[in-house]
Amino acid sequence: MDSVADLGGATGWGKVSPPPPQDQDPPFHDAWEGRAFALTLLAMGRVSGQNLDAFRYALGRLDSKSYFDDDYYGRWLNASELMLVESGIIAPGAVDARARANAGESVEQPADPEPNKPDYAPTAAGSLRQVEEAPRFAVGDAVTVVTDVESDANKLPAYVRGHRGVVEAIQPAHVFPETHARFLGENAQHVYSVRFTSTELYGSDAEPFELTIELFDNYLQDKENAA
């Protein structure tokens, strides 16, 4: 999660002011949002057969302007375009050229690219899997979160790295997003609910509370092996 999307524990964003709840809040507030949602599903189907990890990885690789300035469904469109370009389904600049042409400009359309679509097929529906290996950790075990990860496709929030917690529950094994997002295999592994104290994460001045987060086996080490 080394990306613009990793905002957990970050400062400098000002006061959070959520909108007031509504009894009948519509899923789409403007017509274009519904079309953006549909186009995203079509793009994922063309590229990856609904590999949600690949889509989330594309979201995380957007520049800050594309991520923050175009609203929620705008960033979905930006991520979909990135996936389509990387897969050789559309050429870089093709979306902009088509939009300008539709607006009446005389624009040269880019040539069709060489296809580069991933060779991907899921082994089963959904993301839950069975693994033969027994869990490395048990409920009540003290664990330390690793500090180094191999890929920017990881799902390890920065604010828990290097910190100590206690295993609270063992969750079903799950496809590993770090490799799945890059079409490098499912590599399913155990997932643990790990409980942290506020002072462990944020220092002695933090208000008292506990936070539980689900972490993949690759992101944990025991006390003896912690650096």
Image: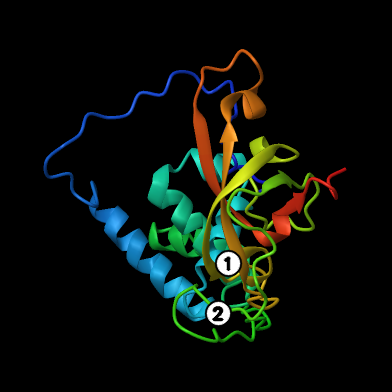
The kind of residue tagged 2 is Gln
Can you say whether 204 is above or below 151 in the image? above
Decide if residue 148 is on the left or right side of residue 12.
right
The kind of residue tagged 1 is Ala
Residue drawn at x 67%, y 56% as measured from the top left: 154
In percent of width and height, residue 128 lies at 49, 73
Is the Cβ of the residue at disc 2 closer than 8 Å to that at disc 1?
no
Q: Earlier in the sequence, mark 2 or mark 1?
A: 1
Can you say whether 99 is above or below 66 in the image? below
Give 129 or 4, whichever is nearer the viewer: 129
Can you say whether 13 is above or below 159 in the image? above
In percent of width and height, residue 68 lies at 50, 39
Whole-angstrom CA distance, mark 2 to mark 1, is 21 Å
Q: Which residue is mark 2?
A: 130
Residue 2 is at least partly visible in this image: no
Residue drawn at x 49%, y 19% as measured from the top left: 14
Are there few (<14), some (14-19), or many (20+) residues within 10 Å of tag 2?
Answer: few
Residue 156 is at least partly visible in this image: yes
Residue drawn at x 64%, y 53% as measured from the top left: 61
Can you say whether 5 is above or below 11 in the image? below
Q: Which residue is mark 1?
A: 54
Q: Secondary structure at mark 2?
A: loop
Q: Quadrant of residue 147?
A: top right
In percent of width and height, residue 29 lies at 23, 46
Q: Quadrant of residue 123?
A: bottom right
